[in-house]
Amino acid sequence: MTEEELKNKEKRKHEPLTKKESLTFFFIPFNGIANGLNYSEQKRFEKHGYQKKIEQMNHLQGLGRLFYVLLIFIIYVIRKKIL
């Protein structure tokens, strides 16, 4: 590997998630059989050692789960008041 390739490889390890990746992990926070996209991205990050992206992914997935819990709770409360 040349010095430039090593420099680029090290640079990619410290780059944050793109907006598209961030939105994907936020709105689809569940890993599983139905969600092969997030699972494959997670494995790719682990394979290449993208530690910063793994940390951001875990954080966004937690926020995404919280978002859905709050959304369900708000819908429940609104529905309870209407009925």
Image (cartoon, rainbow, N blue to C red):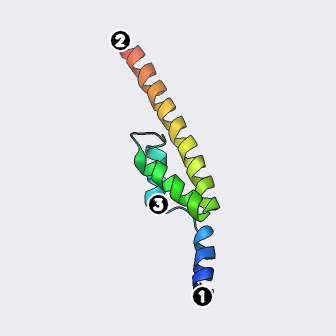
Task: Return the residue at label 2.
Answer: 83
| Residue found at x 48% / y 48% | 39
- Side of 42 relative to 36 (left or right): right
Q: Gap in Å between the C-alphas at discs 2 and 1?
A: 68 Å
Element class at badge 2? loop
Q: Give the residue type at disc 2.
A: Leu
Q: Nearer the viewer, residue 10 or 55?
A: 10
List x then y, in percent, for residue 83: 35, 11
Q: Earlier in the sequence, mark 2 or mark 1?
A: 1
Residue position marked by numbered label 1 in the rendering:
2
Q: Position of residue 54 (x, y in %)?
A: 60, 55
Please provide percent x and percent y for residue 48: 58, 65
The amino acid sitting under disc 1 is Thr
Nearest to N terminus: mark 2 or mark 3:
3
Q: Is residue 16 above or below residue 66?
A: below
Comparing marks 2 and 3, which lies closer to the viewer? Answer: 3
Residue 68 location, x and y as percent? 47, 34
Amino acid type indicated by mark 3: Lys
Foreground tag (2 vs 1): 1
Within 10 angstroms of label 3, few (less than 14), some, or many (20 or more) residues? few
In the foreground, 83 or 29: 29
Image: 76 above or below 11: above
Q: Residue furthest left?
A: 83
Label 1 – label 3 distance at C-alpha: 30 Å
Q: Earlier in the sequence, mark 1 or mark 3?
A: 1
Q: Are marks 1 and 3 in contact (CB under 8 Å)?
A: no
Residue 50's tag is none
Identify whether 50 is placed above or below 24. below
Q: Which residue lies under the disc numbered 3?
A: 19
Quote the CA–CA distance across marks 2 and 3.
39 Å
Residue at left offset 60%, top offset 63%: 50
Residue 46: quadrant of the picture: bottom right
